[in-house]
């Protein structure tokens, strides 16, 4: 319960629970697919088992091994088998490959290498390598839809250009890599409608280069990335401001980084600054955590990232992909970007002794629940619009029919314009238009989500004005 006190949003009304469980509003309510007599949608038992399978002991092993390479600086040795980023790269590739061997051929692993030209933190052309494991979806209509989870395996000490110093990088960001690797282990033997990519990227500390390369290649290849989750500094519940063992911050932007002037004009006219695709993804993650990873609180932070810092989700945002960042609630800057040393009796440095493996495991469970729920749900409806051709106190919505064969129908959701979370939902059947009678589009924010026959719900699609 400690996290509830730390996060006032966690005590928001049962309205959030209404949305999560699928309870319907009394007015115009209809039966929700796979709901019990109380209107509560069932949990996916297989997702619950995945969450339970996350191992804190395995996470401890991963973080300890990555820290043992001494430094993982992007400019460190690429051919020393014991020390440097090359040794870490090869170990990660072997770990992902061993996991893929148990996937029945559905997971493939690759080293995505490229040469980064000279830049402010790259003094000479340098090979940077991402380790990428791809678990292909099994539903033909959904297999191209992709979700990405990532941590960065490079590390640094106080001087970002110091290549030889010890930089164990246990929290920043062996912890995030452990989330990605452990999620791959848990999910590899299961099947999903959509594709899930598990990554360990390099070059983050030098300028987000690994993530930028992957995102740009995906954009050029028209990859349909519907959600990117980066985990960066998720290794400790302790910080300089206190302790939060049952909470992790989820950063999401409201106004899209990639917004065009025309899109900005539309957003300003409808008041959609709190309803970008990344914010809908964050709300979905919060609901998944509530359903499968309690007491862990996915603590929504309505901001792209922390002050003076940036993470690997940003290159995805710049290319129009929904992306969010996980980071522990209370950071300790004595154990980030610091030379390993004792000064005035205080231990500095990003050492394994300051990482809590049980906490990182809880963050991993939130990630696994979110990825599994996303990849088993239908895609968020496309072409979602709110009709503006007539003055009325009703709200007319429309959307395109989804391609998935198991779609049972759609839910309309809404909230007061001042509410941070969706508070009401109504299943409206397998239709592509619906009028919410007696509720004015001027007074509420609306959205639509798809529901399949098993009760899985997509993220919400926010409507734009249509004629």
Image (cartoon, rainbow, N blue to C red):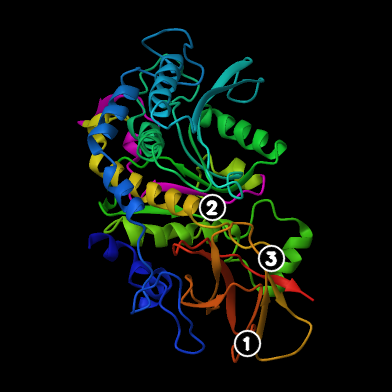
Name the image quarter holding the C terminus.
Answer: bottom right
Q: Is residue 191 left or right of residue 292?
A: right
Q: Which numbered dot is residue 23?
A: none
Q: Please report the residue visible at 29 percent of the width from the left and 52 percent of the height from the top.
A: 241
**Residue 336 in sight from this viewpoint:** no
**Residue 129 in sight from this viewpoint:** yes
Q: Earlier in the sequence, mark 2 or mark 3?
A: 2
Q: Please report the residue visible at 42 percent of the width from the left and 21 percent of the height from the top.
A: 72
- Between 21 and 237, the one lying in front of the other is 21
Residue to which mark 2 is pinned: 304
Q: Count neighbours of disc 1 (C-alpha within 10 A) and say few if under 14, some if 14 to 19, many if 20 or more.
A: some
Q: Position of residue 257 (x, y in %)?
A: 65, 52
Give the quarter of the image for residue 220: top right
Q: Which numbered dot is residue 440?
A: 1
Helix, strand or loop for disc 3: loop
Q: Please report the residue visible at 23 percent of the width from the left and 60 percent of the height from the top.
A: 2
Q: Count neighbours of disc 2 (C-alpha within 10 A) and say few if under 14, some if 14 to 19, many if 20 or more.
A: many
Q: Position of residue 121 (x, y in %)?
A: 58, 24
Q: Residue furthest top?
A: 80
In the rendered view, tell whether residue 237 sits above or below residue 381: above
In the rendered view, tell whether residue 53 sits above or below residue 205: below
> Label 1 to label 2, Cα distance in Å?
31 Å
> Label 1 to label 3, Cα distance in Å?
22 Å
Q: Which residues are magenta?
A: 319-345
Residue to which mark 3 is pinned: 400
Q: Earlier in the sequence, mark 1 or mark 2?
A: 2
Instruction: Name the mark nearer the viewer: 1 or 2.
Output: 1
Q: Please report the residue visible at 62 percent of the width from the left and 26 percent of the height from the top.
A: 120
Name the image quarter holding the N terminus.
Answer: bottom left
In the rendered view, tell whether residue 400 sits above or below residue 36: above
């Amino acid at each position: 319960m400690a996290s509830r006190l730390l996060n006032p949003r966690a005590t928001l009304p049962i309205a959030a629970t209404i949305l999560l469980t699928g309870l319907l509003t009394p007015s115009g309510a209809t039966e929700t697919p796979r709901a019990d007599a109380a209107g509560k949608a069932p949990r996916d038992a297989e997702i619950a088992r995945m969450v339970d399978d996350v191992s804190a002991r395995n996470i401890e092993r991963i973080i300890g091994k990555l820290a043992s390479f001494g430094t993982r600086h992007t400019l460190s040795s690429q051919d020393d088998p014991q020390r440097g980023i090359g040794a870490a790269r090869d170990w990660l590739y072997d770990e992902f490959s061993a996991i893929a061997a148990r996937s029945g051929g559905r997971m493939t692993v690759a080293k995505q290498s490229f040469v980064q030209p000279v830049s402010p933190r790259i003094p000479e052309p340098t090979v940077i390598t991402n380790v990428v494991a791809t678990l292909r979806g099994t539903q033909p209509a959904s297999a191209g839809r992709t979700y990405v989870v990532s941590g960065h395996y490079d590390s640094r000490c106080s001087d970002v250009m110091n290549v030889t110093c010890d930089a164990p990088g246990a929290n920043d960001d062996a912890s995030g890599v452990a989330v990605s690797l452990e999620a791959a282990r848990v999910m590899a033997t299961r099947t999903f409608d959509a594709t899930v990519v598990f990554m360990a990227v390099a070059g983050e500390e030098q300028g987000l280069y690994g993530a930028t390369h992957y995102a740009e290649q995906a954009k050029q290849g028209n990859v349909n990335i519907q959600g990117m989750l980066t985990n960066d500094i998720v290794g400790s519940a302790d910080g300089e401001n206190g302790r939060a063992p049952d909470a992790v911050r989820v950063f999401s932007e409201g106004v899209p980084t990639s917004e065009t002037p025309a899109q900005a004009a539309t957003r300003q006219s409808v008041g959609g600054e709190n309803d970008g695709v990344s914010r809908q993804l964050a709300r979905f993650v919060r609901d998944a955590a509530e359903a499968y990873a309690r007491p862990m609180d996915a603590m929504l932070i309505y901001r792209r990232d922390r002050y003076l810092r940036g993470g690997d989700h940003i290159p995805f945002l710049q290319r129009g992909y929904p992306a969010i960042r996980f980071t522990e609630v209370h950071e300790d800057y004595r154990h980030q970007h610091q030379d390993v040393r004792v000064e005035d009796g205080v231990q500095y440095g990003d050492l394994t002794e300051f990482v809590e493996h049980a906490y990182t495991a809880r963050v991993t469970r939130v990630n696994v629940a979110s990825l599994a729920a996303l990849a088993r749900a239908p895609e968020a409806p496309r072409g979602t619009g709110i009709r503006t051709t007539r003055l009325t106190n009703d709200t007319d919505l429309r959307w395109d029919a989804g391609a998935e064969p198991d779609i049972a129908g759609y839910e309309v959701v809404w909230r007061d314009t001042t509410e941070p979370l969706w508070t009401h939902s109504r299943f409206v059947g397998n239709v592509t238009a619906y009028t919410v009678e007696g509720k004015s589009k001027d007074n509420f924010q609306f959205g639509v989500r798809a529901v399949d026959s098993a009760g899985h719900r997509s993220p919400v699609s926010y409507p734009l004005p249509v004629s």
